[in-house]
Image (tube, helix red, strand yellow):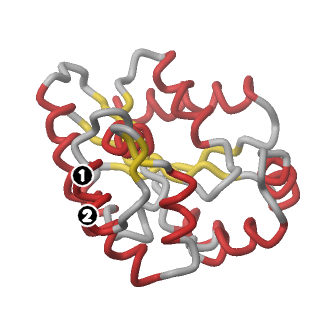
Amino acid sequence: MKTIGLTGSIGMGKTETAKLFAEQGIPVFDSDAAVHDLLGSGGAAVEKVEKIFPSVKKADYIDRKKLGAKVFGNSVALEKLENLLHPMVTSKRNEFLKNISSDLVIFDIPLLFEKGYEKDFDFIIVVSAASDIQKKRVLERAGMTEQRYADILSKQMPDAEKTTRADFIIQTGRGLDYAKNQVIDIIKKIRE
């Protein structure tokens, strides 16, 4: 089995690209979805997060807005949260792998390079788009501001650096059909 790390900065189209791989029959492990599960109703991280960040729990889940307010812009708090969640996500990833019989598997990891995970994969794919397209996509999101966008970008490795470290690059600025053709081509090249 070949393991493939899929990453890209905010607004580059990584989520849609992951769906394109899934449409081609490639299993996809979504790290963000794993975190949502851990923090969601009855999630394995709920009590642990509440213990570190009191008053972020609502019923049996974590209020992500309250948690975000405590960690956004606070590197010490964010590190505490990541130190708790990352091993739990890795455990979910390993569990996911046990049930896979495919020759290829995609791991959708937003901060793959930033967290040093590139060594964990046989191939790295970076999803990219022109900066004006990226900015337009992000600023269309509910609740997004120019300042918040700038803050998020400041915590991410620049796209230019990510693309130089990639085995494959998928350009998403030309539409879904173009991206789909790149996905099909990459699957073929990896299988060869």
Position of the N terminus, as image quadrant, is top left
Identify the residue position indicated by label 2 in the image.
Answer: 51
Q: Indicate the position of residue 77 as horizontal and vertical percent values.
A: 40, 77
Q: Amino acid at mark 2?
A: Lys
Residue at image point 24% right, 21% down:
102
**Would residue 163 be seen by someone viewing this image from the given angle?**
yes
Residue 28 versus residue 108 in the image, above or below: above
Q: Nearer the viewer, residue 56 or 44?
A: 56
In the rendered picture of this protein, how many numbered marks are placed on residues?
2
- The circle on residue 173 is none
Asked where in the image residue 26 lies, by quadrant, the reply is top left
Q: Indicate the position of residue 182 as horizontal and vertical percent values.
A: 61, 33
Q: Quote the CA–CA distance across marks 1 and 2.
A: 6 Å
Tags 1 and 2 in contact by the CB under 8 Å rule?
A: yes
| Circle 1 residues within 10 Å: few <14, some 14–19, many ≥20 | some
Q: Nearer the viewer, residue 106 or 49?
A: 49
Q: Indicate the position of residue 7 as horizontal and vertical percent values.
A: 50, 52
Q: Amino acid at mark 1?
A: Glu
Residue 40 versus residue 9 in the image, above or below: above
Position of the C terminus, as image quadrant, is top left
Identify the residue position indicated by label 1 in the image.
Answer: 47
Q: Indicate the position of residue 100 as horizontal and vertical percent values.
A: 19, 23
Q: Secondary structure at mark 1?
A: helix
| Circle 2 residues within 10 Å: few <14, some 14–19, many ≥20 | few
